[in-house]
Amino acid sequence: MAIIIKKEPEQKTITIAELLPEVIAIRKRGMRVCQICAAWVNEQFELSYSFANDGNYQLLTLRVVIDKDVAVPSITPIYPSAVFYENEMKELFGVKVENISTDYRDKFYRIEEKTPFGPESEGE
């Protein structure tokens, strides 16, 4: 029988300028991107980038809080699989993501309302 020791998840709030250097360092540690989440909270976007290391059950989340007009750099040059998360943030929330490796240009989902979860949605 294997004994599994689970580490407490770590969350770190960073600036946009710190995002790419942090993601590069995380990649060098052998962690994989496991989710990227966007939320529109208190008139700002909260972007959460989560990374996991399956070998030691480590979970690390980087949190970036930005205004709606601020662009965030794509992490697809470092983690190509982030392309789907970033297109989702862009299309559903209206997050400005720069230099996505494959930009679906708001055609990732079949939706009628533009950015239904973002600041420009009808629910605001």
Image: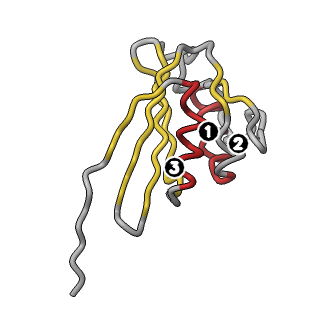
**Where is residue 75 drawn, in percent x and y?**
64, 41
Q: Nearer the viewer, residue 35 or 15?
A: 15
Residue 113 drawn above or below residue 101: above
Q: Amino acid at mark 1?
A: Glu
Based on the displayed image, in which of its 4 quarters is residue 68 positioned? top right
Residue at the image point whose x is 25% and y is 51% from the top: 8
Badge 2: few (under 14), some or many (20 or more) residues near its Cα, within 10 Å?
Answer: some
Q: Amino acid at mark 3?
A: Ile
Residue at the image point whose x is 53% and y is 39% from the top: 22
Residue 69 drawn above or below residue 29: above
Between disc 2 and disc 3, whose residue precedes?
3
Between disc 2 and disc 1, whose residue precedes?
1
Badge 3: few (under 14), some or many (20 or more) residues near its Cα, within 10 Å?
Answer: some
**Where is residue 122 drawn, in percent x and y?**
54, 15
Badge 1: few (under 14), some or many (20 or more) residues near its Cα, within 10 Å?
Answer: many
Q: Secondary structure at mark 2?
A: loop
The residue where tag 3 is placed is 26
The residue where tag 2 is placed is 108
